Amino acid sequence: MAQTLLDTARSTPLLLLGRRADPDSERGTICPGDVPAPGDPALIERARAARAALGDDLFVLGHHYQRDEVIAFADTRGDSYKLAVDAAANGAPTIVFCGVHFMAETADILTPPGTRVVLPDLAAGCSMADMAEIGQVETAWADLRAAGCDRVVPLTYMNSTAAIKSFTGREGGAVCTSSNAERAMRWAFDNGDQILFLPDQHLGRNTAVLRLGLSLDDCVVYDPRRPGGGVTPEALRAAKVILWKGHCSVHGTFTAAHVALARARVPGVKVLVHPECRHEVVTRADLVGSTEFIIDTIRSAPPGSRWAVGTELNLVGRLAQEHPDQQVTFLNETVCFCATMNRIDLPHLVWALEELVAGRVPNRIVVDADTRRWARVALDRMLALPGA
Ligand code: SF4
């Protein structure tokens, strides 16, 4: 069966980005003919004018997964953690966050009260963050207590709602990122016997097994849609890491067959993936790391390097354009943007900027005081991790 899948995959061309090497299959680029360019000139001019009018009172943050026509207006680019830190350090009274909802919440938590954080489209959420609702997590916590698991430390990935971060802080846990998940897990085991890892099962599993040396059998998956999480009390007590059944809808699309295909079609290719990918993908890759790690790895690679990259397509396409002396391909033969990140487009950005120029604050993201207080505790514990 696996052989058949691989044969099928071999007949499908890899998406070679930024070279126009295969116009029939290279998607996500500018359309020829009468179709408008993604960055309409009139909109670009309006964005420039509004940005100039707002001056130093405005700081625009752009996540690496944003569209090119949006990232062009970012004062700083980064992953979710770097952007939150940049927002806190900048001190501008107004922030336009070109990212998704949980990132804007984190910026609101880390910036001084009164800072106005704007998300240009409120529909820009995160499917992973939405997979852990606070009521579900409180039920899971009660299930753990009922099973006799009373030395559990909750850890939540940055990609979670403010309510989950707040729960984590209140229950003695911390936030982590894909860069410091190993340090956070070691800290948690210094402070308890078990970890409840939210909401990304893949980052939790990959870190526990590949970084801490635990076995797959040390991990159980708690499914919030099943009674008791679908795990027996005995299995909950025996586990070292209880993984929440959540995943990223972008990174979860990469498979072992994609890795095999990349190796078969591109001699000497190095497979570089994000730890939100499935365990079967991460264990077959050459290099695994955060978004910033992926960017730094390609930036410092010699000319002629060949990469198949397993992360969001806007970023991979941009890396291909920025490093024409290397061969950067996407580790999936089909297009997969982060749909919610892509909600932030130039029309929404222009609308948000022009509203601010007019003295109105659109789509302000505000975290209530109690949620903010405990979420801040969880974030500060992360910032205090050794080596942070
Ligand atoms: S790439 Fe995945 S984790 Fe990141 S915002 Fe999109 S759905 Fe969420």
Image (cartoon, helix red, strand yellow):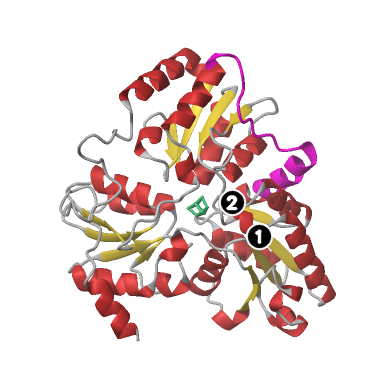
Could you say where residue 339 lies in the image, as x and y percent from the top left? Answer: 47, 49
- Of residue 140 and residue 241, the one placed in the foreground of this image is 140
The residue beneath circle 2 is 158
Answer left or right for 374 relative to 126: right
- Write down the region rendered in magenta: 357-380
> What residue lies at 48% left-to-right and 33% top-to-bottom?
61
Instruction: Indicate whether residue 366 is drawn in magenta.
Output: yes
- Of residue 197 and residue 386, the one placed in the foreground of this image is 197
Instruction: Estimate the spatial distance between the alpha carbons at disc 2 and disc 1, rounded to whole Å.
Output: 10 Å
Q: Residues within 10 Å of mark 2 (few under 14, many from 20)?
A: many
Could you say where residue 368 lies in the image, as x and y percent from the top left? Answer: 76, 37
> What residue lies at 26% left-to-right and 40% top-to-bottom?
30
The residue beneath circle 1 is 155
* 60 vs 149: above or below: above
Instruction: Indicate whether residue 180 is drawn in magenta.
Output: no
Farthest residue, direction front: 34
- Which three-letter amino acid code belongs to the residue tagged 2? Met
- In this view of the protein, can residue 191 be seen by the observer? no
